[in-house]
Amino acid sequence: MTNAEIILETAKWIEDRLGEDLPVPAVAARSGYSLHHFVRLFVGVAGIAPKEYILRRKLSEAGLALAGRRCRVTDAAFEYGFRDLETFSRAFSREFGVAPSAVRRGATFSYLAPLALTLSRAPTIACAPVIEHFPAALLAGRSIRVTEAGDSVGKLWAAFMPRAASVPRRREPPVFRQLATWDDAAEDSLDILVGLEMETLDELPLDLVGKAVPACDCLVFGHRGSASRIAESYEAIYANLLPALDRRPALAFNFERYLPDAGDPWSEAYRFDICVPLA
């Protein structure tokens, strides 16, 4: 059974227990993976962290029951494992931007389907990866901590790009990178920095953050397709390609490299590189 199939089997196991308390370490143990490896593979396959996936699946099924007026809000809260109405209502409103009572009255919400129903398109990694040596680099940009898939990183890029042209001491021609770093002790969060390669950080503006990236050998995978399909590339890399290549990632980061001719992010011709440091 492949890694992707194991994650899908685990997701089906979750579906049968949406009314129960499902701590991620217990789910990871059931899958046979270590916690850190499970979280990384789950994000690669699903495009969303397991903790957030479990919560959104609980809330989605509760919302479906409310939309069909099959139960009261209080009943939905307890059926899907929430300890009280206030906790359920607060979580539902935070995730979907609408109160559960409003959904029962006919409001819409962003239902998250079970994982097995969402993996319908082929991965966007068309060519075999190459190994490339990256010298140590300096990056400057803006950063955010993320715990779920969503548009927060896209918004970060949108805020940074108008600023990029005036960043002093950047490399020319400009090379953009998105750096993801994590702590093995953190359950399901990533620190994301979007920015530029720099000549030096000595004149770093106060509104930007700097980061030194060590030299490393990377497997470089070429993503081809709309930015909306990036999760598919990570699924292919971490759930299928790396295990098939028998290569082990090293270091607690990976990064995306964007060249000036990357193209329109929302076009199927969009391209950039996903770089995974090797052990």
Image: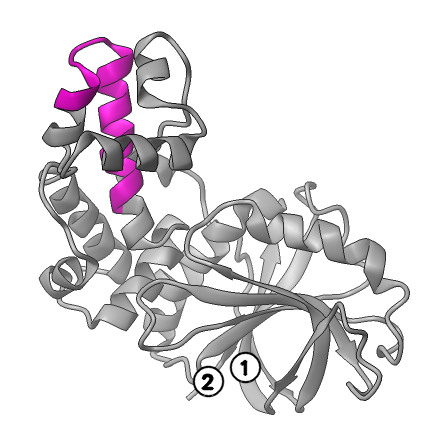
Horizontal and vertical percent for residue 71?
15, 13
Q: Residue at x 26, y 65 (%)?
A: 38
Mark 2 lies on residue: 278
For label 1, the SS is: strand
For label 2, the SS is: loop
Which amino acid does the dot numbered 1 rest on? Answer: Cys
- The foreground one among 135 and 161 is 161
The relative height of residue 34 versus residue 75 in the rendered view (above or below) is: below
Res 133 visible: yes
Mark 1 lies on residue: 218
Residue 264 in the figure: left or right of residue 8: right
Q: Magenta stretch: give its range.
A: 54-75
Sequence-wise first label, 2 or 1: 1
Residue 83 in the figure: left or right of residue 150: left
Res 225 visible: no
Horizontal and vertical percent for residue 263?
77, 51
Horizontal and vertical percent for residue 176?
74, 67
- The foreground one among 46 and 232 is 46
**Can you tell which quarter of the image residue 238 is in?**
bottom left
